Amino acid sequence: MTDAGLPHFLIIGAMKAATSTLHAQLAAQPGIFMATPKEPNFFSDDDQWQRGIDWYRSLFASAPAGAIRGEASTHYTKLPDLPLAVSRARQTLIEPRLIYLMRHPIERLISHYSHLWLENGVAEPIEQAIPRRPELVDYGRYAMQLRPWVAAFGKQSILPLFAERLAAHPQEELERAAAFIGFDRPVSWHADLASRNASGLRLRDAPLRDRILDQPLLAAIRRTLIPQSVRDRIKRRWQMPARPVLSAETRLALARTFDPDLADLGEMLGCRLDCANFVAAVREKPLGWA
């Protein structure tokens, strides 16, 4: 049940946990409409909220008749930084379906750091950034992020999914997500859409560089006179040279930080979870609420 023109479901996070992949796969199914932009952040960001409900409704105005409407905004689970998402969603949406994707919290943290690096949000190495950027840890405290949504909407309104199982069993997990949002037609996983938002393929943000290179004359010169091997070598200077590596000591410290939250999450899901068994546990079978 939903107000006319508003979404039937939200993908509420977590950041760097395959939300872009699931968004793309759902958008590829006839009969499911995903908003553009992918992350409206309407309920979380004050400037977006101030645009008003009519602006938010307009994001779904081109949905075909009878389509199931959705959007994906990872800002909705970024406590404590964006605390108003739940209350705003509660006052706006009637019985929405909510999908929350999770990933091994340490691996999520590494991808989050890479994302910040590409956006020029951090310059220091990852092990220096962790104590200075608490969101690297906080956004991976899944039980903490989920509790307000459970309190507001109930567990029955939330589907917990895991990036590791989505990668291992994509068709099955897509079917689970589709059934959860009330889509009763067959769905098909599109392998060509499987890899989305890969940090290793992106260039570090540099607006001045982009303005220069996007000039039509310079773009033509670059394509016709500069060999591809030279262009690739220059491009690599703007890419993260390798996925950041954590020391064994830092991994152990992070595991000690994340394990209490994972224990709470495991209790909610009726299983034991910690950093050591996370991947095996979430891949083994679909996990639902206890």
Image (cartoon, grey):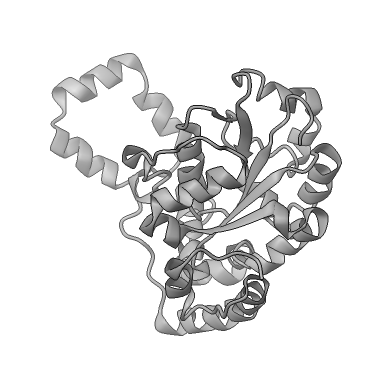
Q: What residue is at 43 percent from the left and 70 percent from the top? A: 284
Is 71 situated above or below 271?
above
Residue 154 found in image quarter: bottom right
Is 265 situated above or below 102?
below
Asked if residue 41 lies left or right of residue 140, the reply is right
Q: Foreground residue, 96 or 240?
A: 96
Residue 223 found in image quarter: top left
Is 196 situated above or below 64?
below
Query: Disc count in the image?
Result: 0
Whole-percent x and y of residue 107? 45, 66
Q: What residue is at 56 percent from the left and 35 percent from the top? A: 38
Asked if residue 152 lies left or right of residue 221, the reply is right
Q: Foreground residue, 123 or 52?
A: 52
Determine if residue 258 is in view: yes
Whole-percent x and y of residue 250? 48, 80
- Name the quarter where the C terminus is drawn: bottom right
Q: Foreground residue, 289 or 7?
A: 289
- Name the quarter where the N terminus is drawn: top right
Asked if residue 184 lies left or right of residue 220, the reply is right
Q: Foreground residue, 66 or 129?
A: 66
Q: What residue is at 67 percent from the left and 19 percent from the top? A: 61
Q: Residue furthest top?
A: 217
Whole-percent x and y of residue 162? 50, 60
Whole-percent x and y of residue 170? 40, 51
